[in-house]
Amino acid sequence: MSIHLNIPNLLTWARIVLIPLVVGVYYLPIPIAEANLIATSAFVVAAVTDWFDGWVARKLGQSSAFGAFLDPVADKLMVAAALVMLVQLGRADAVLAFVIIGREITISALREWMASIGARKSVAVSFIGKLKTTAQMISLPMLLYNDPLGPLNVKWIGGWLLWVAAGLTLWSMVYYLRKAWPEISANSR
């Protein structure tokens, strides 16, 4: 069995390869400010490649079933790794990390089940889900960076945005579960 390698899939694999850097840099004997900068840079590069691989796939007509599977897995792994590291560093509350990671697992499982019964479009990505992702992708690098950036209190803004992301996470989970409820009810007998 061969895995179709195209530019979007290679960008997604690059995002997965960056995960150990985001986590591992904090175990190196380097100053914490340098570790913060390296982890933040790797996370931002991963976030940009997430947008870019989708754009390239559409622009070059290189969408694939494997890419559609791997892309959200890479996103969830990167977010989970960053959250776990931030909890360990004392920069994020474990409850927020649990809410965000738990929702990702729940909705991924729901989408997989809905796809298996031919109803995946019922739980397609919504605007609220995109807002949640935006709040996460801004808060996480801020919390990884952790130092003031000029007049900006990056740690405070990142922490506040993580609470917003957790709230949007719960809201979007309820939204998706409500959209899927007719199928859940019909198929749970």
Image: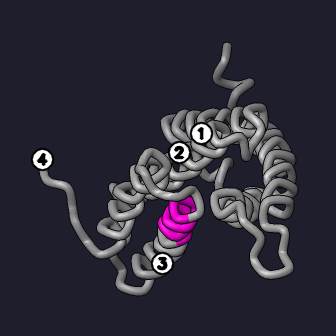
Task: Using a 10 Å C-alpha cutoff, classify the residue at mark 3 as few (fewer than 14 neighbours), some (14 to 19) or many (20 or more).
Answer: some
Q: Residue at x 41, y 62 (%)?
A: 15
- What amino acid is at disc 3? Phe
Please rate how many residues cluster around mark 2, counting C-alpha atoms within 10 Å: few if below 14, some from 14 to 19, many from 20.
Answer: some
Along the line of sight, which residue is nearer the eye, 37 or 173? 37
State which region is magenta: 34-44
Distance of label 2 from label 4 (alpha carbons): 29 Å
Q: Is residue 165 visible?
A: yes
Quadrant assignment for the C terminus: top right
Q: Earlier in the sequence, mark 3 or mark 2?
A: 3
Residue behind mark 4: 1
Could you tell me the amino acid type at mark 1? Val
Q: Residue 52's mark?
A: 3
Q: Residue 54 in the image: x percent, y percent? A: 48, 73
Lower sequence index among marks 4 and 1: 4
**Residue occupying image coordinates x 86% and y 80%:** 151
